[in-house]
Image (cartoon, coloured by chain):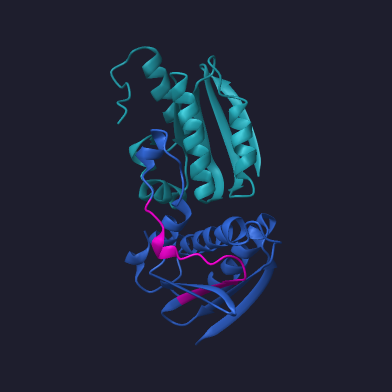
Chain colours: A blue, B cyan
Amino acid sequence: MNHRRQITRAAELECLETLRDFVDTQCKDIPGMDEQTLYDLKLAVDEACTNIIIHGYSGMNPGSIILSVETDPKNVILTFTDFGHPFEPSEAAIPDVQAVLDGRPMGGFGLFLIYQCMDLVEYETNEDGNCLRLTKHIQNQAQTF
Amino acid sequence: MQITDRLENQTRIVTIAGNVDALTAGEVTQYLNGRIHAETKQIILDLSQVDFMSSAGLRVILTALKASRKLGGDLYLAGAQPSVERMLKVSGFTSILKTFPTVEAAVVEFSSQDHGGPQSVERK
């Protein structure tokens, strides 16, 4: 049975916990859901929203984040809509933790974690805003990182 | 989020409870900066009460790790819950620092180094 719920919050770091809790509430009772998969979903939400808050709305008046959670028997689909600067996730570099330890700047870990814990990452930007769509298969336990 | 710390055998054990995300990471970094000194450069981060950690937490750990090693010390992680432990592993952190199932095990490791014991850590 398909299910869809949506929440809109200000793009502020103070809202991160609420957004994570929203996903937890919507997904924790899905058949086949386990703790690691639930953590992956909350981590993806946190990282995606943090990127929107810090980078998406950088230099702008803080706008909003619309998060929708869709579930079907095999997938959880998280969709984030914002109205800040566009950001193409596939262009991000993969971080090297050893390089950071050696003194090079640190960045990209958030996006790296999103790719690690979700199965499909899609991004689109148009006149209606920026839309990041993350899909997690919930019946294949091997998909958790 | 709450942070507490205690000294044991010249090792500073910092316990974090709650969530470490982009909102709270700055507070943790500030706390650690105030406690990593030449006298207490051996740090154990007790993560057993951390329910959630994002990449902001990884940045906190890296900053503290660099600070302690710069002084000739080191930083170990202890008690991370399975989901946090997996995140540390997939991000490559377990290849640059040591993790232990308990604070006690991390203290023993530091103690063995203090006494030049055979279990001294090889850093990669």
Count how many numbered circles sit on residues in the image. Answer: 0
Residue B111 picture quarter: top left
Return the residue nearer the eye: B17 or A66: A66
Asked whether residue A49 is in view, the answer is: yes
Q: Is residue A30 visible?
A: no
Instruction: Give the residue furthest to the bottom.
Output: A1
Going 36% across and 39% down the picture, which residue do you hit?
Answer: A99
How far across and how far down the image is residue B63, in percent?
50, 34
Whether residue A88 appears in magenta in the rendering, the answer is yes
For the view shown, which residue lies furthest in the top direction?
B115
Q: Quadrant of residue A59?
A: bottom right
Residue A121 part of the magenta-drawn span: no
Residue nearest the observer in this picture, A27 or A44:
A44
In this rendering, the answer to whether A126 lies above or below A13 is below
Residue under the point 52% across and 58% down:
A47
Residue B15: x and y in percent read 58, 35
Q: In this view of the protein, which residue sits in the foreground, A141 or B24?
A: B24
Left/right placement of residue B18 relative to residue B114 reads right
| Quadrant position of the C terminus of chain A in the picture | bottom left
From which residue to which does the magenta span run? A76-94
Horizontal arrangement in the rendering, residue A68 relative to residue B62 (left or right):
right
Point out residue A133 in the picture as x, y percentages from the top left corner: 48, 73
**Residue at point 57% right, 82% down?**
A4
* Residue at 33% over, 39% down: B95
Q: Position of residue A14 (x, y in %)?
A: 69, 55
